[in-house]
Image (cartoon, grey):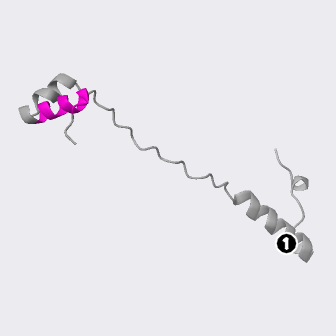
Amino acid sequence: MATISDFGKSVTQMSQDELFGLLRELRQSRRTNKRPAKSSKKSSTSKKEIDIFSALQGMPQAMRDALIKELEGESEE
């Protein structure tokens, strides 16, 4: 248990330098460390796998023919 002798000097008995030092200690002890803001990650959207057959079925016949020609290297230039 604390006794009167455990307490420091009275503020009225301190010099100017001691008072400024005490104020500095109190202010520093009350400051909280500012942590850098956490960088927020953008939620990654899962990439959908593309099924080539369903993509080809959705194309018009003329577009499919043009794609086949380009893939075979017979594109009209």
Q: Position of residue 12 (x, y in %)?
A: 87, 74
Residue 26: quadrant of the picture: bottom right
Please name whichever residue, 20 or 44, is drawn nearer the observer in this view of the structure.
44
Q: Position of residue 37 (x, y in %)?
A: 56, 52
Question: What's under tag 1, amino acid-wise?
Answer: Phe
Q: Residue at coordinates 23% horizontally, 33% vertically from top-left?
A: 70
Please name whichever residue, 39 or 73, is drawn nearer the observer in this view of the structure.
73
Q: Residue at coordinates 33% horizontally, 32% vertically from top-left?
A: 46
The magenta segment is 63-74
Please name whichever residue, 71 or 73, is drawn nearer the observer in this view of the structure.
73
Please name whichever residue, 25 or 44, is drawn nearer the observer in this view of the structure.
44
Residue 52: quadrant of the picture: top left
Q: Is residue 76 magenta?
A: no
Give the SS element for disc 1: helix
Q: From this viewpoint, which residue is outermost toward the bottom?
A: 16
Mark 1 highlights which residue?
Answer: 20
Q: Mostly what secondary structure, the magenta segment?
A: helix
Is 4 left or right of 56, judged from the image as shown?
right
Is 35 left or right of 71, judged from the image as shown?
right
Mark 1 surroundings within 10 Å by alpha-carbon count, few (fewer than 14), some (14 through 19), many (20 or more): few
Residue 14 visible, this orientation? no
Viewport quadrant of the C terminus = top left
Q: Residue at coordinates 18% horizontally, 32% vertically from top-left?
A: 67
Q: Is residue 59 above or below residue 10?
A: above
Q: Position of residue 17 (x, y in %)?
A: 91, 73
Q: Is residue 24 above or below residue 43?
A: below
Viewport quadrant of the N terminus = top right
Residue 51 visible, this orientation? yes
Q: Is residue 28 above or below residue 56?
A: below
- How many numbered circles does the render carry? 1
